[in-house]
Amino acid sequence: MVRYAILFLAAVLIVLGAVLACGCTSSTVTPSAGEIKKFSSADEIRQYIEENTKLAAEAEGGYYTNGATLSRDIAIAPPQAAVAEASSKGLAAPIPSAGTGASDYSQTNVQVAGVDEPDFVKNDGKYIYLISGDTLTIVDAYPATSAAIVSQTTLDDTPKEIFVSGNRLVLFMTGPALSGSGDGPVYAEGLKAMPYYRGYNPVTHAVFYDISDRKSPVVVKDYEIDGDYFDARLIKNNLYLVTREQVYLYKEEEIIVPCVRAGGKCVVTPDVYYFDNPERQYAFTTVSSFDINGGNEKDAKTYLVGSGNIMYVSPDAMYISYQKYHNIYRSGVPEPVFAVEDRASGSSGSSSGVSTQVLWEDFNKMSEAEKQRVIAEMKAQEKEKVVKREIDQTTTVIHKIAIENGAITYLARGEVPGYLDSQFSMDEYNGNLRVATTSNVYTSRGLYEYNNVFVLDSGMKTIGELTHVAEQEKIYSTRFMGDRLYMVTFRRVDPFFVIDLSTPEKPKILGKLKIPGYSDYLHPYDGNTIIGLGKETATNDWGGVSTQGLKLALFDVSDVEHPRQVGKVEIGDAGSDSAALYDHKAFLFSRERDLIVIPARVVVNQGTMTADTGKYTGPRVWYGAYVFGVDPATGFVLKGTVEHGSHDETYYWYGSSKNEVKRSLYIGDMLYTLSTAKILANPINNINQTAATVTLDSRDDVLYPPVRVLE
């Protein structure tokens, strides 16, 4: 925490110095730190962005992360991509069944019960709704024996995700704004001289359909909101949509103010709010709310903040986060030198620009005593570099926004060291926000990495912390459950941590388990049993770690000080993959039905290089889903598999086949697995038998994208 106080003090001194040197006044009203303010004009927005991006650069050594020099027309560095993860108790709020559908059917696997998340596939117990290519497809799926497509609607823009609630379907799409349409410049109340001009800026469409007649969906409302689609949530009848638009400053151009339009007319022009927090890049983040049943707009607010990339939503609040990259190397200070030990001579040499991968390979071969010595040196250098201002450190800013019956109210801002792995790195509990991050610091020995857990109160002030967990490893997955956090880190083995959060001011490690491999996703089975899905690993011929096939693991945490793995299943060889590793919505689990479904691309036999032809033969690639039952005492029981396709490839393809299963769901006693090519229906009590096939794409199998690796 000391280093962040130093950085903040440095930024304050720079600001004061700039004001005194200038001797000028500004039309921008500068709020106190963390206080939210509202802009009154376009000129004020431009001036604020120009001044604060400059301050952010000066406070961090005068350099931008992309190496650009400061100018009025600075191109803003793109945000880091986010990795989606996991789910909570697994079910969204129940959707009223349509017609004579089944009373028991699966819902989208979500992080927080009662907070529905959008997906490209939904079902209501009778119909399956999905985005397939550029088409919105509705399938009458129940009963399976008569399953068939009942309607297909071709979409003009790029479809993203959908919500379904009773006889209402909402589709989110993105595309360019339409030039020359609408009423021309639009002025918000209190934002005079801040016109909106349509051009090539991205917009998000929220299209509300009446699906009372599934054979003929009818558009009720088509809202157009400025910015790219970011994410959305549905809580009861209130739909919350978040869009994001990067702000670029160009001479002689107007600042574009986000607007919510319907029928070419601006129906809501949100007020634009800001904070006294210099950033190197800015984005308009707009939160809009709608009544999903009536299709009416309810509220909208726009915040000029850093470019957000991960969102967590509880029933009462929305938390939008983004990373701040502190590149504070000053002019004349050399880049960090990575020291790599010479294993043959025992000496230590150094060379500028050596990749961290070299260090990690060397680190993995060290004895435990050597590893601890290197970590101790890095930790000491981390403290020294605070004074020398040579740390490249990431912090995460989190904005808390209250959501209540469609009303949107900004509450508070918090900041924690490190970066988030996914939305599952955040969790609200008893009024507090718990956050898990990975920190990295550059030292002369290379990248010093460790993990943290922070607890923030309702005002987003840090009240508890646990730092330097699993040094030289990073977080791969987290799951908050009540007073506990289950966390998996990885570098060479999979440390599975049980962390106590019952006293928010004093988080502590209760126990840990080290096993080969890692888990990308954790899902609760019950209060004492956790399911992990990831990859197996093995030591290679060079002493490093190689990734193998898929791994499904079951952890017993009833003895918190000694968690243990009670079961494990390995699927396929290296190159095997699953959509559920990257998107928790692809993971299907029902404890009541004793059902786990894992979509899988399984690679078997990596093949060999034939000496006489020089050709790479094999491997066999299988596409489908694995279906398991769970015994919490012994592990997993394979119930069967559903095959969507397989290939004996002369070439090995990294990419997505149209036969690769992306989602699964159940309606009644029937399991449905979905790929781009088709939907297969299989009885849950007889998985290996296919009861029905619905063809979605009848073309010959193709791969997306076709990247040939070896010949």
Image (cartoon, grey):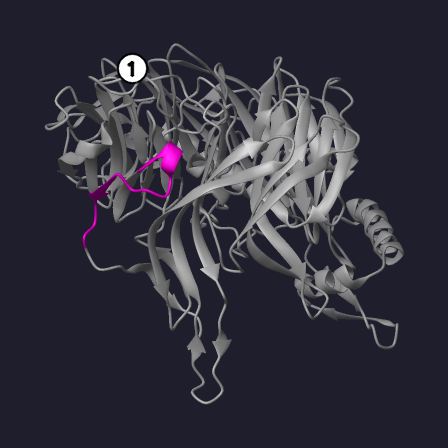
Query: Where's residue 463, x and y in %?
Result: 72, 20
Amino acid on which disc 1 is placed: Pro
Q: Quadrant of residue 496?
A: top right
Query: Where's residue 571, x and y in %?
Result: 52, 51
Q: Secondary structure at mark 1?
A: loop
**Residue at 66% across / 49% down in the picture?**
61
Q: Quadrant of residue 181?
A: top left
Label 1 belongs to which residue? 96
The reply, left or right, for residue 435 in relation to residue 167 is right
Query: Can residue 244 be seen here?
Result: no
**Residue at 50% across / 46% down in the picture?**
80
Query: Can residue 99 be seen here?
Result: yes
Check residue 695 for magenta coloring: yes
Q: Quadrant of residue 173?
A: top left
**Residue at 30% across / 53% down in the picture?**
658
Q: Which residues are magenta?
A: 682-698
